[in-house]
Image: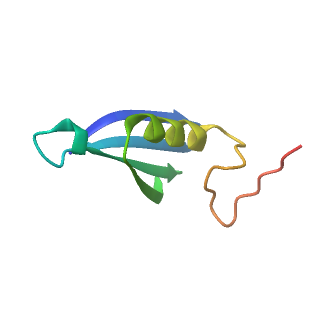
Amino acid sequence: MEIYSEYQDGDRKATITRLKRSSDPRFDMWEVSMFIGGKPIQRSTMNNENDAENLAEDFVRSGSGSAPTLLNEHITNG
């Protein structure tokens, strides 16, 4: 495992970790770990780098309607 990249905006943070499955990089997986206020709230595994990057970017964007939120967090779309 190696941390590939990290995104942060306010109290939201997402890290992307490359999970090496074999010597062939075609079998690598990408894990996105999402945090709010330093607390882990979700981990998702993707098959490719672009999907992982998109998920991490969407999560850290404040006010993103598709991003995971804590139950006590309120998001208004308007």
The residue at the far left in this view is 23
Q: Position of residue 48 (x, y in %)?
A: 38, 40
**Direction from residue 21 to residue 37 in the image, left or right:** right
Q: Quadrant of residue 3?
A: top left
Q: Nearer the viewer, residue 37 or 23?
A: 23
Q: Give me the residue at 40% from left, 42% from top.
A: 15
Q: Quadrant of residue 27?
A: top left
Q: Position of residue 54 (x, y in %)?
A: 52, 37
**Direction from residue 32 to residue 70 in the image, left or right:** right
Q: Give me the residue at 57% from left, 40% from top.
A: 60
Q: Position of residue 78 (x, y in %)?
A: 89, 43
Q: Nearer the viewer, residue 35 or 53?
A: 53
The residue at the far right in this view is 78
Q: Nearer the viewer, residue 33 or 11?
A: 33
Task: Check the image and report above or below for 49 versus 65.
Answer: above
**Direction from residue 70 to residue 44 in the image, left or right:** left
Q: Give me the residue at 19% from left, 45% from top.
A: 20
Q: Quadrant of residue 58?
A: top right
Q: Give me the residue at 47% from left, 59% from top.
A: 42
Quadrant location, the N terminus: top left
Please name the colour scheme applied to the rendered image: rainbow
**Direction from residue 37 to residue 45 in the image, left or right:** left
Q: Count every numbered label the image shows and give the total.
A: 0
Q: Position of residue 59 (x, y in %)?
A: 58, 44
